[in-house]
Image: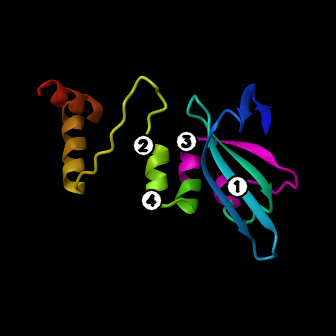
């Protein structure tokens, strides 16, 4: 499916399918939702059928015909929180929308993350700048 919304093209043929979620609501109506990510990193949902499940979370209204709804990065994360496994979630959001950037996910103990943020704040810089400084020192 292809549509233009706010002068931006959303095309399921050229975007990457991130996650599909099909289910039947309490009234027996089938709902099909598919989250896509465009090449520029923007997310959108392809929706068809009943939208009762999760629709309030992303601000949907029910429409009978299939349609595309652009999502912010945060709304896509919320949708994935409800529909994806932890591994699927990490895979969807671990890549940078900037193709020149590499990506790496680092899990720190809460105390270490807090210390990193506190140090960045004290030095009036960013956590990314501290990490870059550390990498440059290797």
Task: Report crowding for label 2: few under 14, some 14 to 19, many 20 or more residues within 10 A (C-alpha).
Answer: few
Q: Measure how far apart labels 1 and 2 are at the Cα level.
A: 22 Å
Q: Measure how far apart labels 2 and 4 are at the Cα level.
A: 12 Å
Q: How many labels does the image show?
A: 4
Q: What element carries label 1?
A: strand
Coloration of the structure image: rainbow
Relative to 38, 98 lies left or right: left
Q: Quadrant of the C terminus?
A: top left
Q: Which residue lies furthest to the front in this view?
A: 13
Whichever of callouts 3 and 4 sits on the residue coming sooner in the sequence is 3
Q: Measure how far apart labels 4 and 1 are at the Cα level.
A: 19 Å
Whichever of callouts 2 and 3 sits on the residue coming sooner in the sequence is 3
Q: Measure how far apart labels 3 and 4 are at the Cα level.
A: 17 Å
Q: Does the magenta stretch include residue 6?
A: no
> Of the numbered discs in the image, which one, if any, rests on residue 59?
none
Residue at label 4?
A: 86
Whichever of callouts 1 and 2 sits on the residue coming sooner in the sequence is 1
Whichever of callouts 1 and 3 sits on the residue coming sooner in the sequence is 1
Q: Measure how far apart labels 2 and 3 are at the Cα level.
A: 12 Å
Whichever of callouts 4 and 1 sits on the residue coming sooner in the sequence is 1
Residue at label 3?
A: 73
Residue at label 2?
A: 94
Look at 66% across and 62% down and name the residue there.
54
Q: Where is residue 12 in the image (x, y as percent from the top left)?
A: 71, 39
Residue at label 1?
A: 33
Residue 3 vs 68, above or below: the answer is: above
Look at 75% across and 29% down and name the residue there.
6
């Amino acid at each position: 499916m292809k549509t233009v919304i706010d002068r931006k093209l959303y095309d399921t043929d050229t975007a990457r399918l991130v996650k599909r979620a099909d289910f039947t609501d309490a009234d027996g109506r089938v709902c099909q939702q598919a989250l896509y990510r465009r090449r520029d990193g923007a997310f959108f949902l392809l929706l068809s059928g009943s939208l009762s499940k999760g629709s309030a979370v992303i601000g949907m209204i029910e429409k009978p015909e299939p349609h595309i709804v652009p999502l912010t990065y945060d709304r896509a994360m919320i949708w994935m929180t409800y529909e994806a496994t932890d591994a699927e979630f990490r895979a969807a959001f671990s890549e940078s929308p900037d193709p020149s950037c590499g990506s790496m996910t680092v899990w720190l103990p809460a105390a270490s993350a807090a210390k990193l943020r506190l140090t960045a704040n004290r030095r009036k810089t960013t956590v990314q700048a501290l990490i870059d400084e550390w990498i440059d020192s290797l």
